[in-house]
Image (cartoon, rainbow, N blue to C red):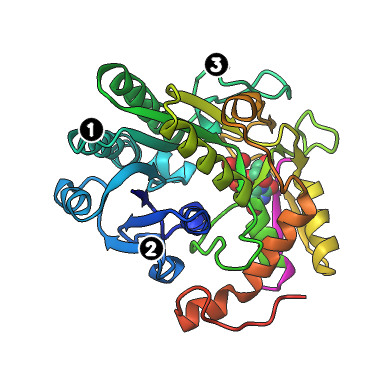
Amino acid sequence: MAVLVTGGAGYIGSHMVWALLDAGEDVVVLDRLSTGFRWAVPDAARFYQGDVGDADILKRIFHENRVDAIMHFAGSIVVPQSVAHPLEYYDNNTSKTGALAAAAIEAGIQHFVFSSTAAVYGEQPDDTPVRESGTLVPKNPYGMSKLMAEMMLRDAAAAYPFRYVALRYFNVAGADPKGRTGLSTEGATHLIKITCEAALGKRAGVDVFGTDYPTADGTGIRDYIHVSDLVAAHLKALNYLRLGGEPLVANCGYGRGYSVLEVINAVEKVSGRHVDVRYGPRRPGDAASVIADSTLARRLLGWKPRHDDLTAIVKSALAWEGKLDLRRRQEVAPGRERLAPLR
Ligand code: UDP
């Protein structure tokens, strides 16, 4: 049987493809290459370029491959963009997830793993780790578009022979420890990515958004999770569904947070380079502290994080950032290049 990975040419999707191949799975990728890269998809996966909302290409994929599970990563993720273009987000993240689920049900595919987000929760009253049963009041169309998709999956699972796991990601960071893929998206705004770019001289410095939060050092706190642990949770979810597991929504984070300044310090330490910092006002829509309670994923999926270490996350992100430009220039297939490691 094969697993269809939508968005498999993107950041998390490409890590998923490698993890599935490592686990001996047969992998099919569907990606329209709007933000992903063809070279990020290993040769061992079958690649289709197209949109997840395109019923024809889905039919073709299901006809040409024995797909028993879908991992749906394709989507739009930039919060300010979602505020400026909400209907695009509802189309891409909500309607197209519905169309994909409908195509899956029509084709008799029963297993679906969905990329959701901590943005479904919105503002938290304090810094206690949030549970799946926490209040769902997204602060932006991005979070709402994912929450609506979750609701559609819930109702579809109640009506049809179809089961899903929705994983709510906290702050995903880092890169494949083997250096096969990483965060390559142009213009990505994640803190760890930006700080690594600054350490490598690709940007002047880092703007710290807000120094007056009710946290120990005044800057925002996030639960940074290594992308390899995140894709490991997806493998567990796939296994759980194949064994007949009931629909499930589960947080993916470590249950502990780091402030913006702690992240910057970690990057300076690992890289051995100074990072210029400019202190600025809060970024609209940002919460003070976002930390996961991931008891459910651990208990029901048997998920055991193995990379819960900020230094290791930063090391892998820096190593990838160091060779990203070469990779982009060469546009070679992953695994074929022979580049020296960063340090
Ligand atoms: N952040 C920052 N400067 C940046 C990017 C992010 O100070 O250039 C802060 C942001 O305010 C938040 C944390 O870093 O407290 C993580 O932000 P990111 O955009 O990486 O992820 P988010 O939590 O918004 O999904």
Whichever of labels 1 and 3 marks the residue nearer the N terminus, that label is: 1
36 over 108 or under it: above or below: below
Picture quadrant where residue 209 is located: top right
**Looking at this rendering, what residue extends furthest in the left direction?**
56
Along the line of sight, the residue nearer the viewer: 137 or 335: 335
Disc sitting over residue 135 in the figure: 3
Q: In terms of secondary structure, where does tag 2 sit?
A: loop
Q: Is residue 286 left or right of residue 161?
A: right
Observer-side mark, 1 or 3, equals: 1
Circle 2: residue type: Ala
Image location (x, y in percent) of residue 233: 56, 40
The quadrant of the rendering that contains the C terminus is: bottom right
Q: Is residue 150 left or right of residue 11?
A: left
Whichever of labels 3 and 2 marks the residue nearer the N terminus, that label is: 2
Q: From which residue to which does the magenta span run?
A: 199-210
Q: Gap between marks 1 and 3, in whole Å? A: 30 Å
Q: Gap between marks 1 and 2, in whole Å? A: 23 Å
Tally the marks: 3
Circle 1: residue type: Ile
246 over 313 or under it: above or below: above
Ligand 1 contact, mark 2 (Cβ < 8 Å): no
Q: In terms of secondary structure, where does tag 1 sit?
A: helix
Residue 17 within the magenta-colored segment of the rendering: no
Give the residue at mark 2. 45
- Residue 208 in sight here: yes
Circle 3: residue type: Thr
Picture quadrant where residue 81 is located: top left
Give the residue at mark 1. 105
Q: In terms of secondary structure, where does tag 3 sit?
A: loop
Contact between marks 3 and 2 (CB within 8 A): the answer is no
Taking the spot 74% from the left edge, 45% from the top edge, the residue there is: 308
Q: Is residue 159 left or right of residue 28?
A: left
